[in-house]
Image (cartoon, rainbow, N blue to C red):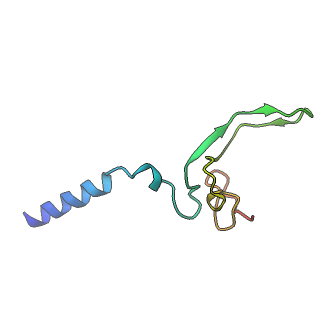
Amino acid sequence: MRTLILLLLVAVISLAPLPADAKGRGRGGGGGGTTTVRSYTKRDGTYVQSHRRTAPDGVKSNNWSTRGNVNPYTGKVGSK
């Protein structure tokens, strides 16, 4: 009975949702989440395809381009 309760407790804890500020934290996680940038054409005629980027949050260290982070969509390692 004690083992069953312990297993149920572990299952409930592992399925519990994380708070919004804890999602995506850590190396390569992007910090505050992601946002989609729609495709557009620059004034000089250059077409920019739609893409994903880290959501703006004012923290430079959690951007995918920052050294130590990895872009989860392209696999590119940050170098800035």
Q: Is residue 65 above or below residue 20?
A: below
Give residue 71's quadrant in the image.
bottom right
Residue drawn at x 64%, y 39% is 36
Q: Check the image and report above or below for 20 versus 36.
A: below
Q: Residue at x 56, y 57 (%)?
A: 29
The picture places residue 9, in percent across and down from the top left corner, at 20, 59
Q: Is residue 19 above or below residue 27?
A: above
The quarter in which the N terminus is drawn is bottom left
Q: Position of residue 54 (x, y in %)?
A: 63, 49
Total numbered labels: 0
- Nearest the eye: 20 or 9: 20
Q: Nearer the viewer, residue 38 or 4?
A: 38
| Image position of 9 (left or right of 55) | left
Q: Is residue 47 left or right of residue 60?
A: right
Q: Position of residue 19 (x, y in %)?
A: 40, 51
Q: Nearer the viewer, residue 10 or 80?
A: 80
Quadrant of residue 60 within the rendered picture: bottom right
Name of the residue lying farthest toward the right: 44
Where in the figure is residue 67, as x and y percent of width and height? 69, 67
Q: Quadrant of the C terminus?
A: bottom right
Q: Is residue 65 left or right of residue 10?
A: right
Q: Is residue 22 left or right of residue 69?
A: left
Residue that lies at the very extreme toward the left in this rendered image: 1
**Residue drawn at 70 percent across, 62 percent down:** 78
